[in-house]
Image (cartoon, rainbow, N blue to C red):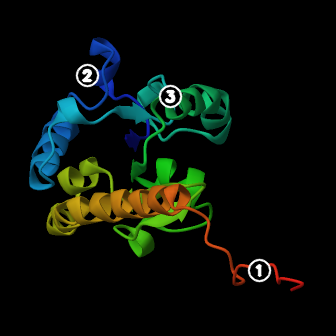
Amino acid sequence: MFIGEAPGFNEDRQGRPFVGAAGQFLDELLGLAGLRRSEVFIANVIKHRPPNNRDPEPDEIAACSQFLDRQIAALNPLVIVTLGRFSMARWFPGEKISRIHGQPRWIDGRMIVPMMHPAAALHQPQYRALIEADFRRLPEFIAQAEAKIAQAAAAAAAPDTPDEPEVQQLSLF
């Protein structure tokens, strides 16, 4: 699951996330990770376009959080990739995207991978290589998450082994 911040002009008109220039770049980034858009779910922190395409405000994020909560609950993704600082702040309050991008952490049984928003590279080309490098590592992160879940499932399925040796009944004769 990928979570951006808010619909832009094109997204608002089409009712789909990431369909403008940032969406085209996101498609390229997904390709670097060996993924296709049809294989991932893309959402936003807020569900409406802010006036004049400004940053989402805290009250807007709070008002839309229940919708994002429901999407996450319905999909139950093992890995969530946050795209930009507003979606990152949900799991990493007070952090800076420039400091923690590309560094996954386990939170509430999910791997959360903070990444820069694709639009950052469109507005500041010096970020392009950094964003691409983070996306190239995404298959590694997904494999780690799948391995951790498989390991937990195997441990849960393993028969209980007693910590103490089995007690033997002694004979009286």
In the image, residue 153 above or below residue 22: below
- Foreground label between 1 and 3: 1
Q: Nearer the viewer, residue 22 or 16?
A: 16
Residue 32 left/right relative to 58: left
- Foreground label between 3 and 2: 3
Q: Farthest residue toward the right?
A: 172
SS at badge 1:
loop
- The amino acid at mark 1 is Val
Residue 172 left/right relative to 15: right
Residue 8 in picture, x, y percent from top left: 33, 29
Q: Which residue is mark 2?
A: 10
- The amino acid at mark 3 is Gln
- The amino acid at mark 2 is Asn
Q: Quadrant of residue 133?
A: bottom left
Q: CA distance from mark 2 to mark 1?
A: 72 Å
**Residue 167: which numbered mark, if any?**
1
Residue 103 left/right relative to 126: right
Residue at (50%, 49%) from the top-left corner?
86
In the picture, the quarter occupied by the C terminus is: bottom right
- Foreground label between 2 and 1: 1
Residue 158 in picture, x, y percent from top left: 51, 61
Q: Quadrant of residue 97?
A: bottom left
Residue 91 left/right relative to 19: right
Q: CA distance from mark 1 to mark 3?
A: 52 Å
Q: Residues within 10 Å of mark 3 (few under 14, many from 20)?
A: some
In the image, residue 108 above or below residue 94: above
Q: Nearer the viewer, residue 6 or 88?
A: 88
